Amino acid sequence: GDMLNFIHMNDNELVECAKSGNSLALQVLIERYSDKVLQKARSFKSLIGIENDDLYQEGMMGFVSAVYSFDNSRDVLFSTFASTLSTRKMLSAIRKINSTANLPLQSYISIEEEQDLFSDIPSPEETLLSVERVNEINSFVEESFSKKEKKVFKLSVLGMKYSQIAEILDCTEKSVDNTIQRIRRKLRSFDGV
């Protein structure tokens, strides 16, 4: 398997090859995304003021685990999925580092977790959760959503299907569907649309 065969593949094709044990395909994916993980690690470091080069390593561990756990049949881009996992890994490292420091991380973390950090094409959810609005939306969600609505909202923003949300929350798909309808109505009233 020559490296050149892989350069022209799209992410999904590379992921499939990597999952079936092809290390060159994994290498190409890593080269495709490592700069973005590095930029993200740097922006975390400067924002949070920590000196820790392990952040990039953590991010890459999250990225590689995304490659092996990505499910092609889901309605979510690999870039979005990988972004979520690598960011989460960095955030949990940051939380460990800062568990003693009293830093106002929460608002920052909620922004980062909802945003797709790799893809330049925003999905409707990301547009909805653009950084300027995310704090307004977060406080609206906090005040107006039930516990269940909050959970369903989070999972749907991550691109999960109703069936997966139902499985995670241990309820029926119909119940997820009803909850999403309620969420849509609330968001519409928030938006004044």
Image: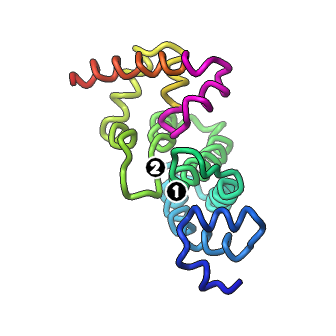
Magenta segment, prevailing SS (helix, strand or loop): helix
| Mark 2 vs mark 1, CA separation in Å | 8 Å
Q: Along the line of sight, which residue is nearer the eye, 1 or 135?
A: 1
- The spot of residue 128 in percent (x, y) is 34, 37
N-term mark: 2 or 1? 1
Residue 115's spot in the image, x, y percent? Answer: 44, 45
Residue density around tag 2, few if under 14, some if 14–19, many if 20 or more, within 10 Å: many
Residue beneath disc 2: 116
* Span highlighted in magenta in the image: 155-174
Q: Which residue is more in the foreground, 99 or 59?
A: 59
Position of 73 relative to 169 (above/below): below
Q: Secondary structure at mark 1?
A: helix
Dot 1: few (<14), some (14–19), or many (≥20) neighbours within 10 Å?
A: some
Q: Is residue 85 visible?
A: yes
Specify the quadrant of the image occupied by residue 20. Answer: bottom right
Q: Nearer the viewer, mark 2 or mark 1?
A: 1
Q: Residue 22 is drawn in which quadrant?
A: bottom right
Residue in the image at 31% along x and 35% along y? 133
Q: How is the image coloured?
A: rainbow
Residue shown at 68%/70% (left/top)?
Answer: 26
Q: Residue at x 55, y 24 (%)?
A: 151
Tell me which amino acid carries mark 2.
Answer: Asp
* Helix, strand or loop status at disc 2: loop
Give the residue at mark 1. Answer: 79
Image point (65%, 43%), residue name: 92
Q: Is residue 41 magenta?
A: no
